[in-house]
Amino acid sequence: MPRPILATIHTQAFRSNLERLRQAAPDARVWAVVKANAYGHGIERAFEGLRGADGFALLDFNEAQRVRDLGWRGPILLLEGAFELRDLELCSRLDLWHTVHSEAQIDMLAAHKTNVPQRVFLKMNSGMNRLGFTPERYRSAWARLNALPQVDEISLMTHFSDADGPTGVAEQMALFARTTRDLPGERSLSNSAATLRHTVDPALAEAQPEQWVPSDWVRPGIAMYGSAPDFPEHTAAHWGLQPTMTLAAKIIATQSIFARASVGYGSSYVAPEAMRIGVVACGYADGYPRICPTGTPVLVDGVRTRTVGRVSMDMITVDLTPVPKADTGSVVTLWGTAANGAVLPIDEVAACAQTVGYELMCGLAQRVPVEVTA
Ligand SMILES: *Cc1c(COP(=O)(O)O)cnc(C)c1O
């Protein structure tokens, strides 16, 4: 028998989350952001649930190839664009749209031999200070691109640094609006947090074009995977999002321990009184963060309880006090949805690990078998 641990990808949850994002941005087309192997879900496994999107955005060429291999003929956008000249041949061959964020990439385009002009997304650095042209250089970059026979349509994009927090997007949005005001082309601004938290009232946008730029294309990632971009201020349930990944494992042994007995490496947990412990077939080598302290929530047979003691490579130990009927073979949900419908948000586990849902999804280990359900 294989080791009793399983990740499940929920196709219907993808559809539901996508629908939810469309409600938040009814006038926009949706890039399903599937970089990092669809946030750890597996591009091939997520595809069925996401094929209702208008396009796929990612940054590895091999991932773009995989999306084409799945039969997708629609738009694909490379979020970091070309890394070297050869990449532009791949863009031509696979019909990829690509981001242009640097002069070096414009040089590559100018040197690219093709009869089929390419569609590009010109990126503005509106304050994140990672990729893109500063507002001062943006318009000259646009003019340079516009003069190239290798370039077909130019779309305009930026990425917000604080869409998930109190700072918000207003300042970056206004800077983008001012800089791009009279430039033609479609606009793409919003990630998950901006799409959910900073929905643009089209009437207001029209009244104040200096301040609001509606996205023609939104670029949600994390919300599509059922995690809240702004946890703990809001939960995924608040946003109407469902987990697309469940990680579950079984109890492989139980221990009845006396008061003052300790559990696991370093004896970090000492039982205050007699209790029953379940040993679960999941550890940090499966992608469960080692840093999760005693008290990290888990569901045992769909009932909420907690970890006790240190996470080890292949096992964690959980408190069975709230679930006296649990035994070897009981299913433990580490994050996601249990058989009884109870949900343990990945964001809660991530918070215990001092990180975000993104990192847990992306960190699901190779050795964990994965199943896709309807
Ligand atoms: C990853 C990424 C997104 C998606 O961000 P989420 O926070 O997951 O919604 C959008 N745009 C760009 C440029 C990205 O790199």
Image (cartoon, helix red, strand yellow):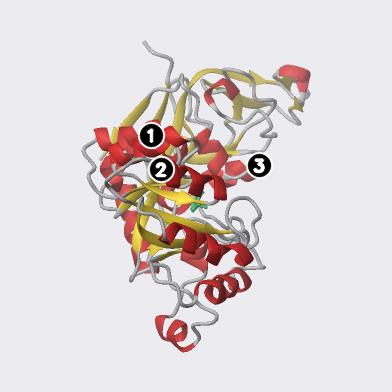
Q: At 55% across and 80% down in the image, what residue appears?
A: 211
Res 34 label: 2
* Mark 2 CB within 8 Å of ligand 1: no
Q: Nearer the viewer, residue 252 or 192?
A: 192
Q: Which badge, 3 or 2, comes first in the chain's sequence?
A: 2
Q: Residue beneath label 3, please?
A: 352
Whether residue 37 is visible:
no
In what quadrant of the picture does the N terminus appear? Answer: top left
Q: Residue beneath label 1, please?
A: 63
Which amino acid type corresponds to the residue marked 2 in the rendered image? Answer: Val
Q: At 48% across and 55% down in the image, what residue appears?
A: 236
* Mark 1 CB within 8 Å of ligand 1: no
Q: At 39% across and 41% down in the image, what residue appears?
A: 112
Which amino acid type corresponds to the residue marked 3 in the rendered image? Answer: Cys
Q: In this view, does 45 lie to the left or right of 333?
A: left
Pointers 3 and 2 in contact (CB under 8 A)?
no
From mark 1 to mark 2, how far is it between C-alphas? 9 Å
- Residue 88 sits above or below residue 230 on the image: above
Secondary structure at badge 3 equals helix
Residue closest to the far bottom: 207
- Which is more foreground, mark 1 or mark 3? 1
Q: Which badge, 1 or 2, comes first in the chain's sequence?
A: 2
Secondary structure at badge 2 equals loop
From the top left corner, tell me how far across and down residue 229 is, in percent: 54, 55
- Mark 3: few/some/many CA within 10 Å (<14, 14-19, 20+): some
Q: Is residue 189 left or right of residue 270?
A: left
- Which is more foreground, mark 1 or mark 2? 1
- Mark 1: few/some/many CA within 10 Å (<14, 14-19, 20+): many
Which amino acid type corresponds to the residue marked 1 in the rendered image? Answer: Glu
